[in-house]
Amino acid sequence: MNLHQDSISDQNVITGYGPDYVQVNRVDHRGNSLIILPDQIQSDWAAPGGFEALSEAAFATLAKLDCVVVLIGTGNRQRFPSAALLRPLIEARLGFEIMDTPAACRTYNILMGENRKVAAALMFDPA
């Protein structure tokens, strides 16, 4: 799906997405996982293997981000990580929402457009 806005600012805007990619400022990003913040992009934040391979270390990385809320996109469908995996986010008192990756992309754009300190941690389903 393509999402377009009239102009691209100096912030990272999700302009499209599909089952195995996210387009940020009209540039495709493919791979295992991705963190998008308004001012930076980090590739491969989670181990290869998608949702099933998530570890506490991946969530510890998210807990260190300079944001108020993390949107966790779990692939083509919404799946909930265990409380043990989410512990770093809970201990950091960081807000988080778990949703499928397309919903996380759309929600990121809305919150980022409101100048909120948001991050999208996106996973893709293994091929």
Image (spheres, helix red, strand yellow):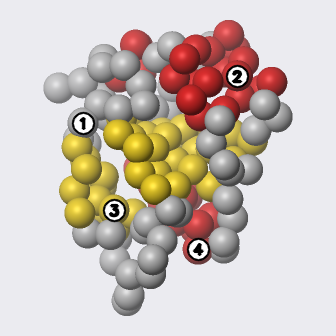
The answer to whether 52 appears left or right of 84 in the picture is left
Q: Going from the N terminus, do you reach mark 3 or mark 1 first?
A: 3
Q: Can you see residue 95?
A: yes
The answer to whether 127 appears left or right of 118 in the picture is left
Tell me the mark number nearer the camera, choosing from 2 and 4: 2
- Residue wearing tag 2: 88
Mark 2 crowd level (few <14, some 14–19, many ≥20, 10 Å Cα): many
Q: Going from the N terminus, do you reach mark 2 or mark 4 first?
A: 2
Please tell me which residue lies in front, 45 or 112: 45
Q: Which mark, by number, is residue 106?
A: none
Point out residue 9 in the picture as x, y percentages from the top left corner. 44, 81
Q: Going from the N terminus, do you reach mark 4 or mark 3 first?
A: 3
Distance in Å between CA atoms under marks 2 and 4: 27 Å
Q: Going from the N terminus, do you reach mark 1 or mark 2 first?
A: 1
Distance in Å between CA atoms under marks 1 and 2: 24 Å
Point out residue 49 in the picture as x, y percentages from the top left corner. 30, 17
Amino acid carrying mark 1 in the image: Gly
What residue is shown at x 78% (from left), y 31% (from top)? 92
- Residue wearing tag 1: 31
- Residue wearing tag 3: 24
Distance in Å between CA atoms under marks 3 and 2: 27 Å
**Residues tagged 2 and 4 counted as in contact (Cβ below 8 A):** no
Which element is circle 1 on? loop
* Residue extending furthest toward the bottom: 6
Q: Which mark, by number, is residue 113?
A: 4
Mark 4 crowd level (few <14, some 14–19, many ≥20, 10 Å Cα): few
Quadrant containing the N terminus is bottom left
Point out residue 95 in the picture as x, y percentages from the top left corner. 75, 41
Amino acid carrying mark 2 in the image: Pro
What residue is shown at x 71% (from left), y 29% (from top)? 89
What residue is shown at x 76% (from left), y 38% (from top)? 94
Which element is circle 4 on? helix
